[in-house]
Each structure stands twice: as structure tokens, then as C-alpha cells.
Image (spheres, coloured by chain):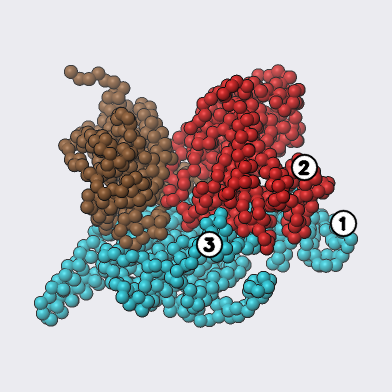
Chain colours: A cyan, B red, C brown
């Protein structure tokens, strides 16, 4: 952990309140995000118990599976979830603008600009925690290979019509969430801890209630007290006052409240099935409905506090000014969304179970590039984050104390001014190390020339400016720092170069197993067993 | 598991390093030039003549009329190979494919008559050998693939880098040291763990997962490591592929004209001169990475190595060779530690000694190395500090002696290290484990301990 | 006539005193033994575990009850899955063993009755069954065998889900877990925990094997059986546990140091949950702990230790990684006062770096932007 973030945590301990870890907001926040607070059944692989979902903080939709082991009830839940999520996605899929993209012409092999559609905005999904993101991924995996009655009329247990499509979208969102800096699917705890340092460990920060308690404690309490109570306080029935943000539930809830309620529901169902006449059936249906309401109330009582906490967290984040490069990264998210929309429209099969070699390598390359981009952009957008890079010797800031005009040796000499910077930072500069500063939103490169000794607490470094000075013999106005200017140079690049193009999957070389073979039209669905969880 | 035979090189029926190495090289060249398989893999422990092998294989392929491409991982490695090729056969037409960055290659190449340099592969077409980095090759497109390639430092190459270039050649010789630092990714790659083509794995891992029947050779003799170091390095880092030193116990000597002043640095120098290893142990204390006492101790050891007029005797020359600054290196785990050692050396008037991190010392060789132990003064161990390859690189750069500077208490630190690593299904466990390798090295080093309170 | 007080029995006596009169020892199971490696630097945990103190009871008596619990849904699902895997004389299980580890087809397998009186009896019965199975040259499934392992002078009894004896005489530990393997991969943290647990069984089996001539091979790859994808059909994966085995072996060997830890205690210390909380708390405080946030998921006493660590202002309460660059500074106050220039040696690089960090932070939060 960097000393600057360590200090922030220790200051949080001392003051009893979370301290800023950023001065700008580094993730995009939609005006109308879709919040999803899912709960799952303990011990089952992704058997949902219920969820709160929606875009209106005052009117979440409550979805409940009263008997999580019942396949039909689970399908009903997923169909309802699809009814909420897919229309939300559709509204964004329909509004597109035209944009240009570089593509390789398949005939000439040249890079050409083509006009394509780009969705004007993209749907944003917010879950409480990292475990929620994993759960979105798991739900996506469990649904995308299902077959509907329309696809396979003979197969038993067909999935409701829109469920496989929801699976593909959730899979796409879960996968996109692995790209550094992306905002299509956010885990609120992660975003909050990017922006605030609490007086507890990062492990404990994964508890949404405790994290919010540090950032915004109730009046009259310290963050530490509020966090402790969020973690541990229980009511007279032994239930946590601040239920876990899910998807896992508290065992005490399962054992004391949920299990008896499900048992009541099961009993009512059996009795209804055994009803001997209409009158009896009516009575017993009322019993069943009551039992189901009991479970719904329980699920709501465990999800509503989290739902409200998520919106509170969103409010806190909205109060921060958006970082200058956030929109640039959101545009990449919009491309990602548009791309998936187009694949769905084109009738492509669902994402396979495993990436092939080329896809995996391309994804890794993209993520490494995005990681570097994110680190550079966050530092450029936020002096506090830049401070961490300066402390690490990866950037330096200081005052220009001298500028000497110089020129390159070439036939047409270009300006290569020498700039002396006085800084108290200790950058890791070596012979001809390249450094960069922002100039009108673009990076200007310079190289380290020499160290000229100390002046007070500061060191004097001579840099040679290399570019962005125009084509003339004299540098354009404002393109060279002047004496007295405060400048900040980074040792890292501001923009990321694209990597080499990998072969197409069908040209996978022998070292990597050769081409993956004909992918079947659609991967086989998971086998259906009598007691399967999803 | 470990070879147990000992004896002098001349005794009949015992280990003859020269003959063993020749036998291995011959088999490798036979498979490379005449074998039916598309790939040949060669494991090379530290200082086992990997570069010599690469140069020889390239020359033999070229002289058999089979032009080839050579893929190395860094520009320094590429330049080094080109220089070696030209040294071995000045008439061989060699191409150095380079990037379009400023100063893309070593200027020394410009003085070589038969070496052509270019940023465009087409301009080098038809040359017998074309050498470049994996990163540059990845941008090259060819109509006809090369019939042969040599991939150097293949264990430090990532699987995805091989994927980008493997279409350029039909068959290849893969050479590398499995004990050095593994390649890494700056983002998580867990989702592909267990897949045979995990893009973040090493190129050799993927290659062998898909082609398990490729011939695998290993170079059995380290010509660099002295007889005092080969057993330790072999046991600790290559437990399943042991190797031997090419020289015997009496073949290398390190002598100092100036007598010891009795201080810690001199005592540890004498111990290292005598046994090949020295551990200078400072009092136990938690410190930040750039522990000034430890950094100063490292610098003092280097200063005394130079002041005491050392001379190294080895099989390379009949006369002892002076131990000069260019024959000494300092190894650290972190860049800021290296910077601190450099500053401390400057304060003591030492300038020409190489000081670098393990990553940058890979593939280099010195007479004496001074190592700041990666765990010295730390309150806890981390995966980075425990990484087997890091310690292996630091402990295997020397021809004569290695001196480790460390604070006391590291064995207890290792014992207290929580071991709750996650396990990915389908991923082969890498041996040896860093935790065990550290224990093994420390227990050996403790026999050469000099405690010192500066 | 009483046996002479050897070193071992003296230690047992001492540990019984620490536990409290009439408090039976909490038996150590494989999970507890595997957990020794989760924080081996903690003397408190080593002593309490070694003495057989029930840490959950102790934590409640101290007023900081642990939050570990199991949902009955998970419990039921786990049991149902294990029963399904072992149904039909273990046919499915042996099919998986054969599929992953090879050997002749398991058309027939013996499933010996391992019932006996008491853990010692069951251990002896298991040892006998293992010997017979090894000699038989066929497949044998040992369902819930009992193994013993010497832990700091006392026997810990361990009950693996199953051990399979191969026709070639080799032994394989089988772990059955109810977390899923989806598309061939499973939660790495859970697999890691299962591997550490299985390593304990392998160590115990190796002791049994060592008493046989010739000693049969105890495979260092164990078979992990889990539900496949979203079904309750079993699937399996072989897991190499050599690393976990060597770590656990070393930690078990180190447990003998609990004698030294016990020797350092003031006389009359006792951890009986009947004692008044203040006395109990003082007893617990007399053994040094090494609290870190990871303890919260691994030790029943974690909330108690966390409270104490926070009271002391220990920086490790915020995470082990935090102290990396703090050198000798270990408390919140000492770090902050050094950072703010109120204490600390300005020549100490930790102090110097802290001051620079504090200055940069102040500048960034108050000063102009950096562009």
C-alpha cells in the first residue's frame, strides 16, 4: 500500500471519519442506473432467493423465489428479472448516433474509416459489492445456454422466452466489469473505496454498511462506532440490524426466519395439492398466499436496507466532480455495449463457455492497455492520485527556473528547448528517460538531460522538450514552458499504443493447439437433472 | 532425483562436464536440424551456455542453407545475439530488425560489415539470419512463413506473445531458463487459469500443453557457477532437473592482497573467498525497503572488495585476473533499493559497479555478486518477495562468490508467513515453492554467517 | 503406579490446567489443523489450539462472540450431495477416481465396515482395513475412515470424507465439497481451503503407510469432488497438495513451541469460560496475539483481538500490507506524529518518506491542481 493511502487510513482512524482518497470521481455514473440487490440460497450454486431491482429508488421491484429448489419458481423469477432488465437495456439500444471507426478492409488489408452506429448512452448496472458482480456473472452463465420452448419444443423444462437473452447480457456486463476503469457494471463498495479511505482494512471495506458508516456516519457517532454497529449489531431476534449486502445471507437469518417460512410455504403447497373440493382449495390457496407473502416480507426486509444504502452511496459519489477523462472511458463502454447489441441482433450464438486462445489473448491485451490508461488518466485528473505517483518517483512537479533555446542537429533544425525544473520530488530519471506533460489535453514529450545539483530542498533537472511545438523554426506560442511556470511531468505515457494484431481464431498456430474447430451453432445447453439448482 | 556421482573430471567412468555438455548439445542440434518434430525445447540452468547454443544452432541452420528468424525478448538480448553471431562468423549475413523508436539498437552493430539494420522486415528479406524482439516480430507480416525460428528466453516470454508470432515460422527451437522470473500480467488473469493456452502463462507452458511429445533437452552443466554454488542452486531451484558445475572445487580461487581489517565486511569477504558464499547478518530490525544500514553495508562490502585488491583465478586464464569494478554486481529486489545502493556507492567513491534489480540482472554474469536479501528487514513476506525466480536470479549470477546482506530474523519471518494461497483447478503446481526455496537457501547460507553490528 | 512424568505428559498436564478444571479438550479436526497455517505467527492462537481450548466459547465468554455459523440450507445440501456421490457402494465416486487417476476399470469395489467403539477403535479398524485393502489388489472405498495424527503430544482424530485404495496399492484422499465446479473451475479460495484440509489427511495417512512393509504410496494428488455446473451431478478434479502438505508439516512440527509459550505465562493462568470476564480477558491478554484482518474469516477470537489491536492503535489492524514501509513504527499515533513532524528521527528513511507523503497529500488536498 502506498504511504499516501496508508496515511489517509490512519488519519481516518484518528478523526473517526473516512478521508478522501481522490478529489474527483473516476467512474461514470448514469443519470438513471439500474440497481440490482440479489440474494442467493446458501449451499446452492446460484439458486436465487430474491432481489430488489429497478431504476427508481423509491419503488424497487421485489422479486422472490419462495422455494429456491423449485425450478419453475426459479424460472418465474428469472423471467420477471428479464422483464425489468431487458426493457431498460432496450431503451439504450434504440438510441444511436453515427460514428467513425477504423477497420481493416478485408480485400486490401488497409486501415479504412467506416461509418458505424454508436449508442448515444449505455445502460449502467450497479450492484452492492464485488460478490454481487460475481453473482451477475454466475446468473449470466446459468441462463445463456438455456433453450426456450421455441428453440427446442421437445426438451423438458424449457426456459421462459427472454431468459437466455438476459443471460447473454449479464454475461457481457460481467465480462466488461473485468476491464479496468469500465463502468457498465459497478460494485458500489469498490467505487466508494476508490474515493475514500476508511479507518478499517480493505477487507472490512467490502461490507457496504460499514464502509458507508465510515464515509458518512450518523450525527453524533464516529465512523468506527457506526461501522462496528453495522457489522455486528443484532436485534432482539438475533438478526443483524444491517443485513449483509448479499448475495449471501446471514446464517442466523436462514436458520431462524427463512427456514421456518419456507417450511410453512411447502406445507401450504402440499395441503393445497391435497385439497378435496373447491372450497377447501380456496382456503388453502389463501394459506399458500399468506405463506408466500411471509417469505416476500422476509426477503424485502433483508434487501431494502442494502437498496437504500446503494442509493446513499450513489448520492455521495455524485457529489464529487467528474474526472476529466471519465467521459472518454465511458465512450469505450458505449462501444462495448453497442458491439454486444450488434452481435445479439446479428443472431450470433451466446458467448462460449471458454474463450479460445486468440480471444483470451486479445482480452488480456485490452485489459492491460486499459489498466495503464486508467492509471495515467486518474493521475492526470486528480492531484491527490498524482501525489501518489510523485511519491513513487513516477512523476514530478516543480517550477521552471530557466529556459534555454536549442535546436536539433538535423538539416532543418527544429526547436529543442532546454528547460530547467526545480522539484522536491525524487523521480527515477535515467539517461534520456522520456517524460510527458499535459499541453492542451495532449501529451508533450521531453527527455531528461542532466541533473544540475540541489537548490535548497529541491533538485534541478534539465529536460529537453521534444514535440508539440509546431512546424516552424520558432516554437508556437504557449508550447514551451516559461520561467516561473509550475509544471508536472510524468514518467509514464498518457496515451496507450495499440498492440500487435493477433491472428484470427481460425488461424491459431500449432503452438496454441491450432484452430479451435468449428464452433457449433450454439453451445450445448447444460444437462437438466431433476434436482439441479438453476 | 539428484545425481550423486562426484570425482575429478579425469577419473574414468565419472562425470565429465565437457563431454556431458557436448553430448547434450549434439542431441539438441540433431533434433533441431534433422528431427521430425516442429519444436524442440531446451532448459538451460544459469550459465549453462544458452547463448552459445543459440549462436551455434543459428550458424548450423544457416550453413545448411536454411535461413531463420531469431526471437528474443529484449533489445539488449537481440543486440547481444547479433554481436555474438558476427563474432563467431563475420561473413554471415545477419539482419537486425528494430523498432522505429529513437536509438532502437546498439550502435556497435553499425560497425559490422555483414549486419544490416532496418525497421522494415522486407528490407532484410533474403538474409541468412534475422534477429528481433518478440514485440517487433508481432507486427511483421509474411507471405511465406520462415522454415525455422529460434526463440530465446522462452520461459520469460508470455504465451500471448508467442501466439502473436508463431504464425511466422514452421518450426522452432525454444531455449530458456525455467528457474528465472516468470512473465507476469498487470491485470488479473484468473479467468483463464487452467486453460492450456492461458495468455499470461509462459510460452513454454502453452507450447508443451499442446505438444506434449516435443523433445525436451536440458543443458546439464553450468559453466558460470562455481563448484561451491551449483549444488545449492540446483537443489533449491531445480530439484527435478539437477545440473552440475563445469569446474571442480579447486578450479576457481579468489585471493585478496590486502589482509582483513577484522571488520564485518572483510570477514564476510574472506568467508566468501574461502567457501563461495557469505552471509553478512545485521541485527534484527524492521525497516523500510531502503534500510540505510543494510544499504551502507552492501556498499561497504563492495568498497572493500575493490580496496583489498582481489584476484580471481579460473580455468579461463593461467594467470589470476584482477577483480575490478566491472566484474562485481549488486543485486536488489526493488528499484529504489538499487538507487539507494548506487548513491551509497557514489558516497564511497565507487562508480563502475553494476547495481540492478533481479529482473534486469537476468542473463548477466559477474565474478562476485553482493545481494541485498529480498526479505531483509521486512515485517512480512509477500508473494513478490517470495518469488522463487527472484531469489534464483540473485543467487546465480556469480563465477566465484556471492555475498548476501540481510537482517537477522528472516527464518522466523518465513515461519510466520500465512499460507492461505488460493488454488486454481487444472494449474500445474510450480516447483520449487518460493517459501521452501527461501528456507533452503537461508539454511545453507547460515553456515557462512558473519554477524555484524555496523 | 502413575507413569513417570515425561516431557510429553508434563506438557499435557500443563495444557489441561490452562484449559481449566473439568473442561474437556476441544478436539482438533483437519480444518483446525489446516488453519494453523493461516496465521502461524500468532502465539495466542497456537497456545489455545494446542491446549484444546474451545475458542468459540471463549470468545462468547469474553463478550466478543464469533460470527461463524452455517446455514442449514448449506448443511443439508452438503449432506445430500455427499450421500449422492457415495450411493451404490461408491460406484460413481470410483468412476471419478478412475477417470481422473487411471488404473483398471472399477467394476467391483469393496466398501469395508469401519464401525468400532471410540475414536481409537475406529482408527485401529481403519488401519487394518487399509492394510487388507492394499493387499487385496482391487479397488476399495473407505467411507469416513478415522485417522490419528500426533499434535503437540496428543492425538488428533481426523475423519476424511473418503479414502480410496487403488488396485496397485496406492491411497488417494477424497474430499467432497458442495461448492460447484462451473466449466471446470471453482472458487480458488475454497479449493485452497479444501487442499489444506486434505493435506492434513495425507500427512495422517502417511503415518499409517509408514508402519506397513512395504509402505504403500499415499498419492500427493487428492481428488476433489464437487457438483458440476448448476446440477447436483458430481464432477472431480485432481489437486496437487504437495505445497500444502509441506507447509502443514512444518506448522505441526512448530506446534511443539507451545511448551515455550506456556512457560512464558505467569503462573495460575487459566482460560476456563467460567471465570469472570476481566480475569479471563487478562489471561488471554497474557499471550501475545498477531491480529490481522484476515483473522476475521479464520479465527473465532478475531473480534476480541481486533478490539484490542484497535485500542492499542496497532497499524496492522488496518491490514498487514500497511506496515510494509513504516519500518519500526507500529502504532497509528506514532506514524501520524512522525508524519506531522512531531516525533521521529528525520534521518530514518521511513520518517522521511512519511513526511514527504504527508506534505504531498496536504498539497494535493489544499493546493492547486497538477497540470
Residue C179 percent across, percent down from the top left: 34, 55
Mark pair 2, 1: CA separation: 36 Å
- Which chain's residue wears label 3? A
* Disc assigned to residue A164: none
Question: Which residue is tagged 2?
Answer: B89
- The mark closer to the camera, 2 or 1, is 2
Q: Quadrant of the C terminus of chain A?
A: bottom left
Q: CA distance from mark 1 to mark 3?
A: 51 Å
- Residue sitting at 54 percent across and 40 percent down? B388
1 and 3 marks in contact (CB < 8 Å) = no
> Sequence-wise, which precedes: disc 1 or disc 3?
1
Q: Which residue sits at x=64%, y=26%?
A: B247
User: Is any part of residue C337 visible from this angle?
Assistant: no
Q: Position of residue B396 (x, y in %)?
A: 61, 34
View extreme (left): residue:
A276
Callout 1: chain: A
Give the residue number, with chain letter if any, for mark 3: A515
Q: Is residue B293 left or right of residue C29?
A: right
- According to the image, label 1 marks what residue? A409
Within the image, what quadrant is residue B136 found in? bottom right
Are the residues tagged 2 and 3 within 8 Å (C-beta)?
A: no
Q: Are marks 2 and 1 in contact (CB under 8 Å)?
A: no
Few, some or many C-alpha atoms within 10 Å of disc 1 (few <14, some 14-19, many ≥20)?
A: few
Q: Are marks 2 and 1 on the same chain?
A: no
Q: Nearer the viewer, residue B216 or B261?
A: B216
Residue closer to the observer: A25 or A264: A264
Amino acid at each position: 500500500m502506498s504511504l499516501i493511502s496508508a496515511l489517509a487510513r490512519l488519519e481516518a482512524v484518528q478523526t473517526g471519519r473516512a478521508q478522501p482518497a481522490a478529489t474527483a470521481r473516476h467512474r461514470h455514473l448514469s443519470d438513471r442506473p439500474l440497481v440490482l440487490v440479489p440474494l442467493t440460497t446458501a449451499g446452492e450454486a446460484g439458486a436465487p432467493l430474491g432481489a430488489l431491482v429497478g431504476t427508481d429508488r423509491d419503488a424497487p421491484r421485489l422479486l422472490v423465489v419462495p422455494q429456491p429448489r423449485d425450478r419453475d419458481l426459479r424460472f418465474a423469477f428469472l423471467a420477471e428479472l428479464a422483464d425489468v432488465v431487458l426493457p431498460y437495456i432496450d431503451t439504450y439500444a434504440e438510441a444511436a448516433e453515427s460514428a467513425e471507426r477504423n477497420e481493416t478492409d478485408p480485400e486490401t488489408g488497409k486501415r479504412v474509416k467506416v461509418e458505424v452506429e454508436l449508442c448515444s448512452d449505455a445502460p449502467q448496472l450497479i450492484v452492492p459489492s464485488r460478490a454481487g458482480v460475481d453473482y451477475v456473472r454466475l446468473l449470466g452463465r446459468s441462463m445463456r445456454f438455456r433453450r426456450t420452448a421455441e428453440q427446442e419444443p421437445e426438451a423438458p423444462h424449457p426456459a421462459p422466452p427472454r431468459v437466455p437473452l438476459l443471460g447473454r447480457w449479464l454475461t457481457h456486463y460481467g465480462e466488461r466489469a473485468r476491464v479496468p476503469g469500465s463502468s457498465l457494471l459497478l460494485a458500489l463498495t469498490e467505487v466508494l473505496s476508490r474515493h475514500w479511505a476508511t479507518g478499517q482494512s480493505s477487507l472490512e471495506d467490502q461490507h457496504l454498511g460499514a464502509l458507508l458508516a465510515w464515509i458518512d456516519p450518523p450525527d453524533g457517532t464516529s465512523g468506527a462506532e457506526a461501522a462496528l454497529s453495522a457489522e455486528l449489531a443484532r436485534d432482539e431476534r438475533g438478526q443483524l440490524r444491517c443485513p449483509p449486502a448479499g448475495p449471501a445471507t446471514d446464517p442466523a437469518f436462514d436458520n431462524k426466519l427463512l427456514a421456518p417460512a419456507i417450511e410453512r410455504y411447502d406445507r401450504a403447497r402440499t395441503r393445497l395439492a391435497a385439497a378435496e373440493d373447491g372450497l377447501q382449495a380456496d382456503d388453502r390457496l389463501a394459506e399458500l398466499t399468506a405463506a408466500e407473502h411471509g417469505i416476500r416480507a422476509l426477503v424485502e426486509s433483508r434487501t431494502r436496507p442494502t437498496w437504500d444504502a446503494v442509493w446513499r452511496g450513489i448520492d455521495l459519489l455524485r457529489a464529487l466532480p467528474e474526472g476529466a477523462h471519465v467521459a472518454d472511458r465511458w465512450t469505450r463502454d458505449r462501444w462495448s455495449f453497442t458491439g454486444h447489441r450488434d452481435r445479439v441482433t446479428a443472431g450470433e450464438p451466446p458467448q462460449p463457455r471458454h474463450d479460445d486462445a486468440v480471444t483470451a489473448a486479445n482480452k488480456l491485451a485490452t485489459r492491460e492497455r486499459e489498466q495503464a490508461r486508467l492509471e495515467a488518466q486518474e493521475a492526470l485528473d486528480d492531484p491527490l492520485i498524482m501525489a501518489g505517483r510523485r511519491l513513487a518517483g513516477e512523476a514530478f512537479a516543480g517550477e521552471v527556473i530557466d529556459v534555454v533555446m536549442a535546436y536539433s542537429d538535423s538539416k532543418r533544425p527544429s526547436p529543442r528547448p532546454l528547460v530547467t525544473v526545480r522539484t522536491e520530488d525524487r523521480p527515477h530519471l535515467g539517461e534520456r528517460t522520456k517524460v510527458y506533460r499535459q499541453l492542451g489535453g495532449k501529451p508533450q514529450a521531453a527527455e531528461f538531460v542532466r541533473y544540475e545539483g540541489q537548490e535548497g530542498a529541491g533538485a534541478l533537472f534539465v529536460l529537453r522538450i521534444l514535440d508539440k511545438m509546431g512546424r516552424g523554426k520558432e516554437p508556437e506560442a504557449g508550447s514551451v514552458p516559461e520561467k516561473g511556470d509550475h509544471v508536472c511531468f510524468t514518467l509514464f505515457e498518457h496515451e496507450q499504443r495499440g498492440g500487435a494484431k493477433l491472428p484470427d481464431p481460425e488461424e491459431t498456430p500449432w503452438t496454441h493447439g491450432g484452430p479451435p474447430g468449428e464452433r457449433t451453432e450454439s453451445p450445448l445447453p447444460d444437462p437438466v437433472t431433476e434436482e439441479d439448482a438453476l | 532425483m539428484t545425481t550423486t556421482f562426484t570425482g575429478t573430471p579425469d577419473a574414468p567412468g565419472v562425470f565429465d562436464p565437457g563431454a556431458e555438455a557436448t553430448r547434450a548439445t549434439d542431441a539438441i542440434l540433431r533434433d533441431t536440424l534433422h528431427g521430425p518434430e516442429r519444436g524442440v525445447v531446451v532448459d538451460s540452468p544459469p550459465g549453462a551456455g544458452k547463448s552459445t547454443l543459440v549462436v551455434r544452432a543459428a550458424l548450423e541452420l544457416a550453413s545448411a542453407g536454411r535461413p531463420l528468424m531469431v526471437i528474443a525478448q529484449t533489445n539488449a538480448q537481440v543486440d547481444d545475439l547479433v554481436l555474438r553471431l558476427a563474432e563467431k562468423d563475420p561473413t554471415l549475413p545477419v539482419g537486425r530488425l528494430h523498432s522505429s523508436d529513437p536509438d532502437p539498437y546498439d550502435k556497435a552493430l553499425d560497425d559490422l560489415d555483414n549486419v544490416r539494420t532496418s525497421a522494415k522486415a522486407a528490407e532484410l528479406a533474403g538474409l541468412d539470419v534475422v534477429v528481433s524482439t518478440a514485440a517487433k516480430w508481432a507486427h511483421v507480416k509474411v507471405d511465406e512463413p520462415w522454415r525455422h525460428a529460434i526463440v530465446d528466453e522462452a520461459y520469460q516470454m508470455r504465451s500471448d506473445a508467442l501466439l502473436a508470432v508463431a504464425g511466422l515460422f514452421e518450426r522452432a527451437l525454444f531455449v530458456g531458463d525455467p528457474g528465472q522470473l516468470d512473465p507476469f500480467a498487470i491485470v488479473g488473469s484468473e479467468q483463464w487459469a487452467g486453460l492450456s493456452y492461458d495468455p499470461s502463462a509462459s510460452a513454454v507452458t502453452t507450447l508443451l500443453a499442446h505438444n506434449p511429445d516435443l523433445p525436451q533437452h536440458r543443458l546439464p552443466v553450468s559453466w558460470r557457477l562455481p563448484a561451491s554454488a551449483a549444488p545449492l542452486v540446483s537443489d533449491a531451484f531445480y530439484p527435478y532437473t539437477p545440473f552440475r558445475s563445469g569446474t571442480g572445487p579447486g578450479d576457481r580461487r579468489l585471493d585478496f592482497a590486502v589482509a582483513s581489517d577484522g571488520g564485518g565486511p572483510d570477514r564476510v569477504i574472506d568467508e566468501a573467498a574461502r567457501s563461495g558464499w557469505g552471509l553478512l547478518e545485521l541485527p534484527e530490525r524492521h525497516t523500510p525497503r531502503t534500510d540505510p544500514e543494510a544499504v551502507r553495508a552492501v556498499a561497504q562490502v563492495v568498497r572493500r572488495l575493490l580496496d583489498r585488491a582481489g584476484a580471481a583465478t579460473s580455468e579461463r586464464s593461467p594467470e589470476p585476473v584482477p577483480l575490478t569494478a566491472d566484474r562485481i554486481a549488486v543485486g536488489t529486489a526493488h528499484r529504489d533499493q538499487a538507487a539507494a545502493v548506487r548513491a551509497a556507492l557514489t558516497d564511497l567513491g565507487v562508480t563502475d559497479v553494476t547495481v540492478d534489480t533481479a529482473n534486469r540482472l537476468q542473463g548477466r554474469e559477474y565474478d562476485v555478486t553482493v545481494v541485498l536479501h529480498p526479505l531483509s528487514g521486512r515485517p512480512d513476506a509477500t508473494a513478490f518477495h517470495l518469488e522463487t525466480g527472484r531469489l534464483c536470479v540473485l543467487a546465480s549470477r556469480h563465477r566465484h562468490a556471492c555475498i548476501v546482506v540481510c537482517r537477522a530474523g528472516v527464518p522466523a519471518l518465513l515461519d510466520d508467513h500465512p499460507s492461505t494461497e488460493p488454488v486454481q483447478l487444472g494449474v500445474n503446481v510450480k516447483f520449487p515453492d518460493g517459501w521452501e526455496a527461501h528456507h533452503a537457501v537461508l539454511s545453507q547460507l547460515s553456515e557462512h554467517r558473519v554477524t555484524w553490528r555496523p | 503406579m502413575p507413569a513417570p512424568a515425561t516431557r510429553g505428559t508434563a506438557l499435557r498436564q500443563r495444557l489441561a490446567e490452562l484449559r481449566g478444571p473439568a473442561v474437556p479438550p476441544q478436539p482438533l479436526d483437519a480444518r483446525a489443523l489446516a488453519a494453523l497455517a493461516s496465521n502461524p505467527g500468532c502465539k495466542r492462537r497456537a497456545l489455545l489450539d494446542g491446549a484444546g481450548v474451545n475458542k468459540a466459547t471463549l470468545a462468547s465468554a469474553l463478550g466478543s462472540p464469533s460470527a461463524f455459523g452455517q446455514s442449514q440450507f448449506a448443511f443439508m445440501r452438503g449432506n445430500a450431495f455427499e450421500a449422492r456421490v457415495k450411493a451404490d457402494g461408491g460406484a460413481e465416486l470410483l468412476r471419478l477416481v478412475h477417470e481422473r487417476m487411471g488404473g483398471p476399470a472399477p467394476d467391483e469395489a469393496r466398501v469395508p465396515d469401519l464401525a468400532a467403539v471410540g475414536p481409537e477403535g475406529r482408527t485401529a479398524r481403519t488401519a487394518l482395513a487399509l492394510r487388507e485393502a492394499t493387499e487385496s489388489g482391487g479397488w476399495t472405498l473407505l467411507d469416513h475412515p478415522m485417522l490419528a495424527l500426533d499434535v503437540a503430544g496428543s492425538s488428533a482424530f481426523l475423519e476424511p470424507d473418503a479414502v480410496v485404495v487403488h488396485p496397485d496399492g496406492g491411497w488417494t484422499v477424497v474430499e467432497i465439497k458442495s461448492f460447484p465446479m462451473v466449466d471446470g473451475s471453482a472458487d480458488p479460495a475454497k479449493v485452497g481451503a479444501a487442499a489444506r484440509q486434505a493435506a492434513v489427511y495425507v500427512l495422517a495417512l502417511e503415518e499409517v503407510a509408514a508402519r506397513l512393509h512395504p509402505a504403500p504410496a499415499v498419492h500427493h494428488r487428492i481428488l476433489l469432488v464437487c457438483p458440476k455446473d448448476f446440477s447436483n451431478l458430481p464432477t472431480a478434479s485432481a489437486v496437487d497438495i504437495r505445497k500444502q502438505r509441506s507447509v502443514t508439516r512444518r506448522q505441526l512440527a512448530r506446534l511443539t513451541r507451545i511448551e515455550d509459550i506456556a512457560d512464558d505465562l505467569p503462573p495460575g493462568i487459566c482460560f476456563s469460560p467460567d471465570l469472570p470476564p476481566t480475569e479471563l480477558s487478562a489471561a488471554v491478554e497474557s499471550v501475545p496475539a498477531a491480529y490481522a484482518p484476515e483473522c476475521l474469516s479464520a479465527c473465532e477470537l478475531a473480534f476480541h483481538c481486533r478490539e484490542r489491536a484497535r485500542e492499542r492503535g496497532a497499524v496492522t489492524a488496518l491490514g498487514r500490507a500497511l506496515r510494509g514501509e513504516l519500518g519500526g513504527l507500529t502504532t497509528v499515533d506514532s506514524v501520524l506524529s512522525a508524519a506531522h513532524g512531531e516525533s521521529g528521527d528525520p534521518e530514518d528513511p521511513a520518517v522521511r518518506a512519511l513526511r514527504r507523503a504527508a506534505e504531498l497529500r496536504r498539497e494535493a488536498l489544499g493546493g492547486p491542481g497538477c497540470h
